[in-house]
Amino acid sequence: MSKDTRKITKELNSRMEQFKAALEDENKKFELMDNIPGSEGLIRFEVLLPSKKPEEYEDGLFFYLNEEGVLVNPEYFYRYKSGVEVIKVEVINIPEDYLPVINDIFGELFISEEE
């Protein structure tokens, strides 16, 4: 495990302890909620693309729409599979210069889903 992964895992564990304590004490829960600096509402779409070998892999796109309905930070995912079991998932950001093509192909999906 890398140094960064250990650090992040340690922080996650600390947060989980904080969340558990908030579940047991309503005052801690209110304090936690009152101190959250902000949140952002996103709608996520998952588009699963046709696979030539669905028992070995599936790939697709994650689309996120912000509160204004604007596409933000789309991602491409690749799931390694063994039969029906997912073994590993890789996710990468879609380069900005691909966005016009993505919008042209899938833009109508966002409009119809919002309505």
Image: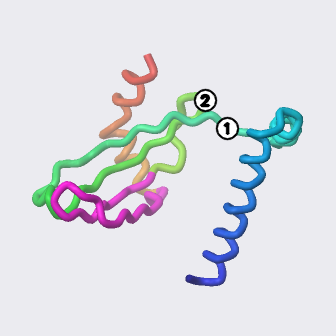
Q: Secondary structure at mark 2?
A: loop
Residue that appears at 78% across and 47% down: 21
Quarter where residue 104 is shown: top left
Residue that appears at 61% across and 29% down: 67
* C-beta proximity under 8 Å, tags 1 and 2: yes
Quadrant location, the C terminus: top left
Residue 93 magenta-drawn?
yes
Magenta residue span: 75-96
Distance between the alpha carbons at the discs numbered 1 and 2 = 8 Å
Residue that appears at 16% across and 59% down: 83
- On the image, numbered disc 2 is attached to which residue? 67
Q: Is residue 25 above or below residue 101?
A: above
Q: Is residue 61 above or below residue 25?
A: below
Amino acid type assigned to the residue bearing label 1 in the image: Glu
Point out residue 34 in the picture as x, y percentages from the top left corner. 86, 36
Quadrant location, the N terminus: bottom right
Point out residue 7 in the picture as x, y percentages from the top left corner. 69, 74
Amino acid type assigned to the residue bearing label 2 in the image: Glu
Main secondary structure of the magenta stretch: strand
Choose mark 1 or mark 2, whichever is in front.
1
- On the image, numbered disc 1 is attached to which residue? 40
